[in-house]
Image (cartoon, rainbow, N blue to C red):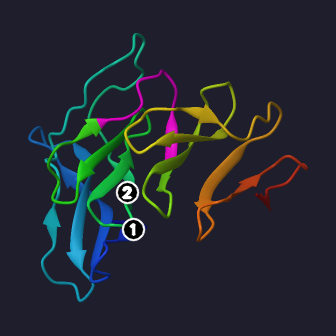
Amino acid sequence: SITMSASEMNDKDTIVFSANAKNSLGQPVRIIERIQADGTRREALMSPDFTPERFWPGYRGTGPENAISPDVSPAGGAIVFTNTHDLYVMDADGAGITSLSRFPKEKYSPKFSPDGKRIAFVSDRDGNCEIYLMNHDGANLRNVSWSFLSSEQSPTWSPEGSEIAFISDAGGKFELFK
C-alpha cells in the first residue's frame, strides 16, 4: 500500500512515497520508495532494516521503524522524512541518511521551503503540537506558532516561501491559519 504523502522529484516524472515492506525479521515497516509517474521503475530508497541512531534517553520507540511523510527538496537533490521520533534527510538516491532532530519529542509533516533552505514541521516539543522551522541541515531550530492551548498541524509553505499556512484548533475547531 502507498501513503499518498507523496512528493514529486524535480523532474516531475518521479514520485517519492512511503510504502509498506517487511524487514528481515518479517515485521511490517514503512520505507521510502520512488516510482516513475507512469508506474514503472519502482525502487526502494532505503532498507526495510533501517535502524536510526537513538539520541535521547527514554526513547519510546520499540520494534521496527516506519519512515513516513517524505518531501523532496525543490532542486530534487534531497528528501526529508520522519519516523515520528526524528526527522531525517537523505540524498535523492537514498544514500546518506542523516538525523536532523536530536530532541526528545515527536515530529510530523516535514516540508521543504520553496528555496530548499528551511524545513517546516510539527512537533510536541513544548507540550502540544506546534509549527517549527529549522535550516535544511537541522540548525537554527525555532517554534513559529507559540500556541499553548491549541494544536497546529499540516504546515504548507506559500509559493514564495515568506509564509506558512497550517491548520489549528485555536478557535475550538480546526481552521486554516497563516
Q: Amino acid at mark 2?
A: Pro
Name the residue located 32 percent from the left edge and 64 percent from the top edge: 17
| Relative to 175, residue 40 above or below | below
Look at mark 2 in the image and give the residue it sits on.
70
Q: Main secondary structure of the magenta part?
A: loop
Q: Quadrant of the N terminus?
A: bottom left
| Element type at mark 1 | strand
The magenta stretch spans residue 100: yes
Quarter location, residue 38: bottom left
Residues marked 1 and 2 touching at CB (< 8 Å): yes
| Element type at mark 2 | strand
Residue segment shown in magenta = 99-109
Look at mark 1 in the image and give the residue it sits on.
6
Name the residue located 52 percent from the left edge and 26 percent from the top edge: 105
Quarter location, residue 122: top right
Q: Earlier in the sequence, mark 1 or mark 2?
A: 1
Question: x, y (%) of residue 140?
Answer: 51, 32
Question: x, y (%) of residue 148?
Answer: 80, 30
The magenta stretch spans residue 173: no
Question: x, y (%) of residue 47?
Answer: 13, 47
Residue occupying the far right of the picture: 171
In whole angstroms, how far apart are the C-alphas of marks 1 and 2? Answer: 7 Å
Q: Amino acid at mark 1?
A: Ala
| Relative to 10, residue 39 above or below | below
